[in-house]
Image (spheres, grey):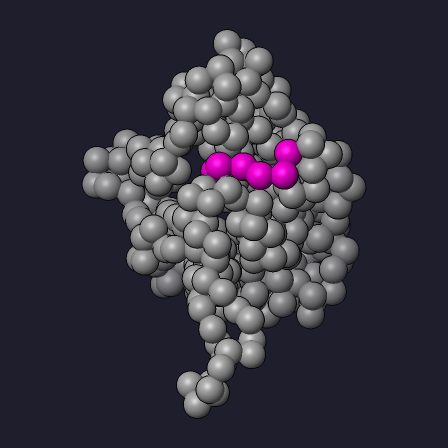
Amino acid sequence: MEFSHIPVMLNECLDGLNIKPDGIYVDGTVGGAGHSIEIVKRLTKGGKLICVDKDEEALAAAGKRLENFKNQITFIHDDYKNLVTDLKNLGIDRVDGILLDLGVSSYQLDNGERGFSYMKDAPLDMRMDRSQSVSAYDVINGMSTEELTKILFDYGEEKLARRIAENIVRERAKKPVETTLELSKIVEDTYPAKTRWKFGHPAKRTFQAIRIQVNDELTRLGEAVTDMTRILNMGGRMAVITFHSLEDRIIKSAFKELNLECTCPPDFPVCVCGKVKEVELVNKKPIEASEEELAVNSRSQSAKLRIIEKIN
């Protein structure tokens, strides 16, 4: 299956990064290289692009798509949260821009065997990095009712988290829950018939929560974004696209903290906290997809783009 991916808010990202032709840029979630190919086209021979992804299939596909620019590109198979260390290993201390397009890619959703979709029957997998040991099967069949409830509530904001967790545990006592459609059916049956389809597919939040747990998507996210900001050159920019409120709250909070000046109480005669404003918010409110983009790319519907510029 071809690794295809329509880049979300492409023009907004390119404008937001304010690309310098001879700069060093990072696509921390290269996916199908939809953003990367347009970034590298704007670089001269002196510019560099670092492409990072946990998914080896994504990196392989990106390598083919970016073949004509291979002398300017370095590929890294890793979680973008390890970016600062990975760059140091390459002898790179500073970059001019970083792009993160968070969440699951269109290819991962569309490729049934990867187990991300609640619409296609497949083994319960959901690993972005298929070399890791823990899969969705292990989470669903190995965690307690209490653990599953917490995952579904915290990561899926699922109101019926407890009931869904109880039903999963009940069903797996008969036989292991092995496929995506088996899990989807358990969730569907948990919902009352009258409200089952009121807010779209009833399994959407459960699958989101399990995927986040499997791939450890939110742990250290704010910390990693803060660390990445601090390797930007002055005037360098970071653009982050999120797809659900949990991610967006973390990014918003991290950017807000970086944007703060002195946090001492107002009655202190001098600053003792030492806090300095490190970034400007390029957009104070998140940028959302245009109506034109929404008409051709449904994945952009929940996307929010936040951009910062390094000033200190």
In the displayed structure, 42 sits above or below 79; it is above
The structure residue drawn at horizontal position 57% and vertical position 13%, both measured from the top left corner, is 71
Relative to 71, residue 150 above or below: below
Measuring from the top left, give residue 170's x and y in whole percent.
69, 62
Quick check: is 13 in the magenta stretch?
Answer: no
Vertical relation: 150 (above or below) 37: below
Inspect this view and state whether residue 154 appears. yes
User: Which residue is rendered at x = 47% and y = 73% of the image?
Assistant: 262
Along the viewing direction, whichever of 129 and 85 lies nearer the viewer:
85
> Which one is nearer the viewer's eye here, 6 or 250?
250
Residue, far left? 291
**Residue 297's quadrant in the figure?**
top left
In the visual, does 57 lie left or right of 187? right
The residue shown at (27%, 35%) is 293
Query: Is residue 96 on the magenta stretch?
Result: yes
- Span of residues in magenta: 92-98
Q: Above or below — where is 61 with respect to 180?
A: above
Residue 226 is situated, as x and y percent measured from the top left of the image, at 56, 55
